[in-house]
Amino acid sequence: MKRALLTASLFAFSAAFAAPSFAQTAAKEATADVAKPVAKPVATVNGKAIPVSRADLLLAGQIAQGQANTPELQAAVREELVRREILSQEAVKKGVGKKVEVQNQLELARQGVLIGAYLNDFATALKFSDADVKKEYETIRATLGEKEYKARHILVDSEDEAKGIIAKLKKGERFDDLAKASKDPGSKERGGDLGWANQATYVPAFSAALVKLEKGKYTEAPVQSNFGWHVIQLDDSRELNAPAFDEVKPQILQGMRQRAVEKHILDLRGKAKIE
């Protein structure tokens, strides 16, 4: 969870200025009228200039979220920056920035910007060969196995409860009906149905028991996991059609970068002097 807070901002600054920016627009205007400076501020509020670079940054964020770079969007960005400047000037005038909680929030925001930019630079500099990515692909395929399984389960708190359910199954009671006693809210109303999934989807103990079952059979001994005690039934199985390497290469690269960043963070923490 803690690492996620850092790595969630990994690509916060990766948006490229692919569309024309405020600076480019200003340059075109300057070509038409040489009296206009290229570096003209996007606006000036009470004598304080708002730089074009700030507008470009906000604009790039909107474009990265799917907005088209239209004159209307640029006008909206300009208005947003003007309002921010007006309000921030007023906040400074009223001494809001001197409050301890505000200073702490500002420092956290500053750290967040630095961390995001640093981790993005680190991740961008990482290089993985096609051989490295293909090896990772094969490792993932091996983990997934060769089949998908359509399973049901009943999850209870104790081994005795699970044994009681197995005894009722042996007497002919329906799995679907008994599943109503399951403490898994996601499947109990569906007769314990977990849908189709590969073996890597489940925790090791569950997966090990599932792959040994024949179609239509259930575990005759309770299966313990960190969630509780399971009674598992295999409804069906089929060959796993894994996606081709080229289809998932970008996602694999992303995962490799993510793990490298997390390792880097742990390495830095290990070297830090913490008292």
Image (tube, rainbow, N blue to C red):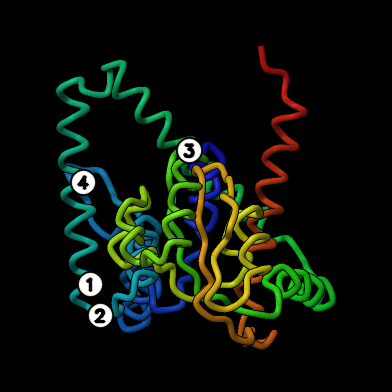
* Of labels 2 and 3, the one closer to you: 3
Question: Which dot marks residue 73?
Answer: 1
Q: CA distance from mark 2 to mark 1?
A: 5 Å
Residue 230 visible to the viewer:
yes
Q: Nearer the viewer, mark 1 or mark 3?
A: 3
- Check residue 158 in the rendering and tell me which mark sits there, or answer none: 3
Q: Residue at x 32, y 84 (%)?
A: 32
Marks 2 and 3, the one that precedes in the sequence: 2
The first of marks 4 and 1 along the sequence is: 1
Within-10-Å neighbours for mark 2: few <14, some 14–19, many 20+: few
Q: Amino acid at mark 1?
A: Leu
- Give, as a three-letter code, the residue at label 4: Arg
Contact, mark 1 vs mark 3 (Cβ under 8 Å): no
**Could you say which is closer to the camera, residue 129 or residue 163?**
163
Farthest front residue in view: 171
Tell me which residue sits at (44%, 73%) in the image.
195
Sort mark 3 into few (<14), some (14-19) or many (20+) by Cα contacts within 10 Å.
Answer: few
Residue that numbered label 2 is attached to: 70
**Residue type of the residue flagged with mark 2:** Thr
Question: In this image, 101 relative to 229: left or right?
Answer: left
Can you identify the residue that label 4 sits on? Answer: 84
